[in-house]
Image: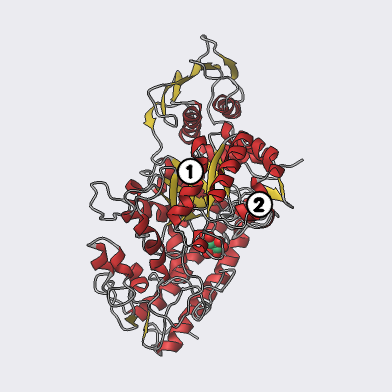
Amino acid sequence: MEAAYSKLWLDYKPLDITFSGSLAIRCLKGVRRDCAAVSELITALSALLPQAELTFGADSASYIVELDIGGYLGPEDYTLSADERGATILGGSETGLLYGVFAYTRELITEGGFTRISRRVSPALPLRMLDHWDNADGSIERGYSGSSFFFKNGELIISDRTVHYARLLASVGINAAAINNVNVRGDAVRFITPDYYRKLDMLGDLLERWGIKLYLSVDFSAPMSVGGLPSADPLDPRVQSWWKDKAAELFRSVRGLGGFLVKADSEGQPGPYAYGRDHADGANMLARAIQPYGGKVIWRCFVYNCSQNWRDTRTDRACAGYNTFAPLDGRFDDNVILQIKNGPMDFQIREPVHPLFGVMKQTNTAAEFQLAQEYTGQQLHVCCLIPMIKEILAFKTYNGRDKDTVLDMISGAAAVSNTGDSFCWTGSELAGANLYGFGRLCFEPSLPAEDILDEWISLTFGQNEELKEKLLFILLGSRDAYESYTVPLGLGWMCKPNHHYGPDPWGYEFDRWGTYNRADRDAVGVDRGPGGTGYSELYYPPLSDIYGSADTCPDELLLFFCRVPYTHVLKSGKTLIQHIYDSHFEGCEQAEEFARLWRSLEGSLPEQVFKNGCERFREQLRCAAEWRDIVNAFFHRLSGIPDEKGRKLY
Ligand code: GCU
């Protein structure tokens, strides 16, 4: 029977070398022969060198891979040294060793054989997490890759796919996974009841073998929905003791449990506000319940008023997260990690970096990204997010610390997963690069985007220089293209309401979600400067000054921060309106070029991959043309200003 899923970048093929000697694995200092690192090494070596005889510990072997645990290393660190005669992989624990084995395997494949290596690696971020928005019924919120492979009709599924999932995550260093949607609904409310413990325990144990902690999204009002109490007030002793008992039961019953992920007081989810308490009260109450078991609470900062009156121009959704959490800095327990979306709105193609990253100096924080391409083409459009994630991590907050970038401030990163039960896991093969790259970046953020993608292409599609060059061109240009033909200059939104796919310039303009473009016949954009909503003031200088004025605001964020007339001249020397027209035409041309390049790869890619890509590019081009023509027509009709180049604007 054909497999129901692709092995992605772990599909090891024989290396193109002649090696007729014998291979040996030698396990030192109590490295257990049945640990994941050893089994992974056996899987890799026997696939890469199928003709070689593989044994354990034979000194006479022509190539020996020695596995060892080094007490002086951090548990997830590894060192790797190799030459033509053998390799030594040393891990700080069996997990570090596993990471070392994956790194070694990568090296064998990308180098095409045994090579000299010497390196010591420690992961940059202690928490490297995937957040699945999978529902108990098997659907996935904002899922573009089929149904859930975790759940079906309220049941938790554990299969060989789950094992492969764990291997994929471990291979890029992801060490935590929240398996259910942050909007906890339906049967998911009962995941923290004995009904699910047996399966959760099996899953937690499976994941832990691959160094991954299991997290559950929990309902803040569980003391009521599960426990039958009259309240979920975090300061009520009955509520506190309910959570303490629940935590004791859960951690006793489920191996490998890492803790809870919580969306509270956000888009209808219950939270501490109902009881006049704040988010520190809410998060700490849960944190204290799970602290004895080493558990962590990942508490989301996506809190805003989603019932805004569009007529109100003073209230600004962009300020909400900051205003809610900045005053609470220093009040969170050590085992609380605030999870902050990369920008202040909601995963648009371009947003400024969230101002909370700079200001939360006494709180553990993690950055949240969205690999699920909700607003970035829903995995039908190619949109590689690796350069964007790198940009955000490297962003200087100017908060007065010597080390002041986002990466310096956070201790973790989480990404809304783009996976599902489609054959290639991510709907589109090219979207797999985002999953791979996210993990690699959390571990080694200094890796250039190009190197990560180069590696991903080699591991996934093999070593073919022409293929690599073309795929790199597509992937590295894809974000710019998407931004150009949708909503450039930081304006965002303008997508169709609810499902968020395709253009609708006024789709959210008179709605309650706080996402407005304020376009009229003279000007467009939101004034978030000191004379406007004041959002720009939430940054440290010089950023507050730079963002606060149209003269200094970078073009790519201009309409996020400023309201400017269509005749405003950008730093590029073009007028705003001409830039809007040009960028839509250019973005579409870029997308056409990507599609042309992809079509030229027929024969260099597996047929199924090629065909899937062709279909997706066809849709991307159709949709990009809609964006171009609708957004350009919208601004043309409002402004009455013709295109300098005389193109048709409808
Ligand atoms: C977006 C998305 C929702 C999701 C929310 C969140 O608004 O559209 O489906 O629940 O983000 O991050 O919680």
User: Looking at the picture, which amino acid does disc 2 mark?
Assistant: Val
- Determine the residue located farthest toward the bottom in the rendered image: 640
Point out residue 116 in the picture as x, y percentages from the top left corner: 40, 26
Residue marked by disc 1: 288
In the image, taking residue 350 as reference, residue 611 lies left or right, namely: right
Q: Is residue 465 visible?
A: no
Q: Quadrant of residue 269?
A: bottom right
Above or below: residue 396 compared with residue 162? below
Point out residue 83 in the picture as x, y percentages from the top left corner: 41, 22
Q: Nearer the viewer, residue 123 or 647?
A: 123
The label shown at residue 362 is: none
| Position of the N terminus by quadrant | top right
Q: Quadrant of residue 111?
A: top left
The span from disc 2 to disc 1 (Cα, nearest Å) is 19 Å
Specify whether tag 1 is near ligand 1 (CB below 8 Å).
no
- Determine the residue located farthest toward the front in the rendered image: 237
State the scheme by which the image is colored: secondary structure
Above or below: residue 249 compared with residue 67? below
Q: Tag 2's secondary structure?
A: loop
Point out residue 147 in the picture as x, y percentages from the top left corner: 67, 54
Q: Nearer the viewer, residue 53 or 255?
A: 255
Point out residue 411 in the picture as x, y percentages from the top left corner: 39, 44
